Image (spheres, rainbow, N blue to C red):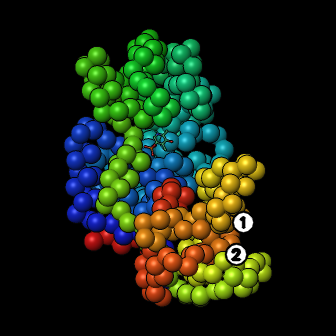
Amino acid sequence: MSLVLTVDGERWRSHLRGFAERHPGLVPVAKGNGYGFGLGRLARKAAWLGVDTLSVGTYDELGEVANRFDGSLLVLTPWRPFGAALDLAPGSPLTRRVIHTVSRVEDLEALLARDPDARFVLERTTSMLRHGLSARDLRAAGALLAARGGLREQLRGVALHLPLAQGSHLGEVRRLMTDVVAADLATTTVWVSHLSEAEQGELAAAYPDYTFRPRTGTGLWLGDRSALRVTSTVLDVHPVERGEVFGYRGRSAPKPGTILVVSGGTAHGIGLEAPSGDLSLRSRAATLARGGLDAVGFVRSPFSIDGKQRLFAEPPHMQASMLFLPAGATVPAVGDLLDVRVRYTTTSFDDVVIS
Ligand SMILES: *Cc1c(COP(=O)(O)O)cnc(C)c1O
């Protein structure tokens, strides 16, 4: 009675391998709900790919990946002198595998005071304006490190988190690289997010002394949708007459049809999408005139039957949803599977089956 992600294993693995081959130095990102697959599964896949480093989003996520992947663990959320980062005991086996992201000069000092052997990358702010050092701060960090002998073994590189591409990133990266070069750091590695394959190639050619390492989640794990199928199961089928009452809200059927109860509800992340239709009064009146069900407040669901996304009969329940199927449509049987369109990063599947 579940919402299930079924993965065509051969196709998925061949995509993962091809992606890794096309992106030298790849650092897979496993964070949040593990892009629908779960963090542990992604950690094992990163080990299978043979990469040397896996990224997690937060310190809280380290525990879920650390015993499934034994390389370095880059934490994308910057280190701060508070919170879960302080749960890592200096010198512990796990701590020694972690690469921190440092985005403020005072944090660099505080991190090294707490753990003189800490490994880290210095994040430079980008047009994202999320976290990072300004050009001047990066030089200050460079000076601070130079005064300690450069810390070549511990400084693992500079990190650049770029916005999702609206055109090319190359101009911005070139400007940022000028700051990186000026900071005179004891590293030539640049960890980048959201660069295309072509951009990475051009940068590698433009800065032959530097190594660019792409940190990628979506394009890697979800890059071949044809390997993925999400299904719900039909749990119940109730033919209804016009005016018949159903649901938590005692709503009545606007016309004859079928109420379907299917697996998948709010607990899975179903139903959080806004209705896509035009909700203006005029268009509602037009739909009403055509007898359209969206005009009576039915919202499109992510569940499809006959290749068409069907309407919710009422808002999704915790683990199941009620759909309204107008008379004339093919009525599935209890136990049939329905395809579901989901956003993988916000969906909790009951099961992930990889063939
Ligand atoms: C989440 C994240 C990524 C990976 O993003 P995708 O769009 O899933 O590839 C890369 N870098 C940083 C800093 C991130 O937070």
Residue that carries the numbered disc 2 in the rendered image: 254
Residue that carries the numbered disc 1 in the rendered image: 296
Q: Position of residue 61 (x, y in %)?
A: 51, 56
Q: Are marks 1 and 2 in contact (CB under 8 Å)?
A: yes
**Disc on the earlier residue, 1 or 2:** 2
Give residue 239's quadrant in the image. Answer: bottom right
Q: State the mark number for residue 280.
A: none
Label 2's element? loop
- In this view, 68 is above or below 277: below
- In this view, 248 is above or below 5: below
Q: Position of residue 263 (x, y in %)?
A: 54, 78
63 on left or right of 247: left
Q: 92 or 46: which is nearer to us?
A: 46
The residue depicted at 36 percent of the width and 36 percent of the height is: 214
Label 1's element? helix
The residue depicted at 28 percent of the width and 16 percent of the height is: 206
Amino acid under disc 1: Val
Q: Position of residue 234 (x, y in %)?
A: 50, 82
Amino acid under disc 2: Pro
- In this view, 51 is above or below 263: above
Give residue 48's quadrant in the image. Answer: bottom left
Q: 335 or 237: which is nearer to us?
A: 237
Q: Is residue 37 visible?
A: yes
The residue depicted at 26 percent of the width and 45 percent of the height is: 20
